[in-house]
Image (cartoon, grey):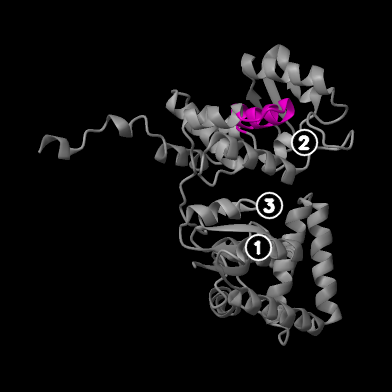
Amino acid sequence: MKTIKLDKIRHKGREVVLIKFPYDLNLGTEARKITGIRWSQSLKAWHAPYSINVLKEIKTIFDSISTIDPQALKEKVAKEKALLEKKKLLNIETIQKIEKFKQWMFSRRYSDSTVISYSEALKVFLIYFHKKAIIEITNDDIIEFNNKYILENKLSASYQNQVVNAIKLFFRTMQNIKIDIELIHRPKRERVLPNVLSKEEVKKILAAPKNLKHQAMLSLIYSCGLRCGEVLRLKPEHLLSERNILLIKQSKGKKDRIAPLSDKTISLLRTYFNMFKPKIYLFEGAVEGRPYDERSLQNVLKQSLAKSGIKKPVTLHWLRHSYATHLLENGTDLRYIQEILGHSSSKTTEIYTHVSTKSIQKITSPFDFL
């Protein structure tokens, strides 16, 4: 039997259980049954929200068909328990400074998730140097923390980046410190190409749901290049059908933007609206006036993949990537794609030029001339 290795890490600001095993179609199919399971291209592994219930699911699903190795997970949990004990070492003054930092971020309108992730990351850093006064911490200490804590514990580059962001922001709000803020460098970012589906694959996925609401949600994500949270926050008044425009309010970075609405999308949404008659949010869950649940939407996609026979570890964000790439292949200017997707930098949008196959397919290999 193949071995499944479990670990626990922070990924994109949340705790997840990492599930690693050699490629196996049967194990991959079983893995998709786990609540909230997703595939990470950067981690090259499956991951799901860390909870006791998810761990029980993993044991139930894999115990009889594989060997489960939880050693790395157990070691990580033990270290976290030790860290919780160390939190008691923070003095009252340090705790007050962290709380003041949180209030400062709230006053600057940082999102709740950013405030939580930054303050928790800062706590980890200050616990590591609990024997040292905050005003005595230097740039060398940050380098030591990166080497002795981040790297030795094999924590992700994204988590390291989050810690660095928190440290820089925190010490900018302080006076009389020994740290030179401008000399604190973030880790080099990994360049991971976005996952893109073919138009035929997208068509199969969008046609798979029998439920009109499910079909409308998936179709709107693809047809407007939306993030998962953006589609769930939409309200009926954001559909400006007379102008063929969708208004996306306060998306990532607290920015408003617009995206073009095709006639086909408008027709689908009108049919949906007449059938479901949503009250507050465009897509509401079981409770009237409350937005549809994100995890339920992920399950909608999972069911669509099963029905369409697509075995790739597709996530909702793949639909957004596919939309951008297909726009580029259709000849849409990168500047317009940047505006539609809400990217602050054109460099973020330019990554789609690396996955567009339109120009690459025209290149003739020298092998053909041999």
In the image, which disc is placed on residue 36? 3
- Please check the rendered image and state whether residue 80 is part of the magenta-colored stretch, yes or no: no
Select label 3 or label 2 by which is in front: 3
Depth order, front residue of 364/88:
364
Q: Which callout, 1 or 3, points to the residue nearer the camera?
A: 1
Quadrant for the C terminus, please.
top left
Q: Is residue 164 above or below residue 238?
A: below
Image coordinates of residue 350 in percent, x first then y, are: 46, 39
Main SS, magenta residues: helix
Q: Is residue 327 left or right of residue 63?
A: left
CA distance separating discs 1 and 2: 31 Å
At 62% across and 28% down in the image, what residue appears?
A: 224
Residue 106 versus residue 307 in the image, above or below: below
Q: Is residue 278 left or right of residue 220?
A: right
Query: What residue appears at the point 50 percent right and 32 percent down from the top-left corner?
Result: 201
- Residue 161 in the image: x percent, y percent? 59, 62
Who's the residue at 16% across and 35% down the image? 368
Res. 226 mark? none
Q: Farthest residue toward the left?
A: 370
> On the image, numbered disc 2 is attached to which residue?
233
Counting from the top left corner in percent of width and height, residue 356 is at: 41, 35
Mark 1 lies on a secondary structure that is helix
Q: Nearer the viewer, residue 341 or 65?
A: 65
Which badge, 3 or 2, comes first in the chain's sequence? 3
Q: Amino acid at mark 3?
A: Gly
What's the amino acid at mark 1?
Ile
Secondary structure found at label 2: helix
Outermost residue toward the front?
A: 64
Question: Are discs 3 and 2 less than 8 Å apart at CB?
Answer: no
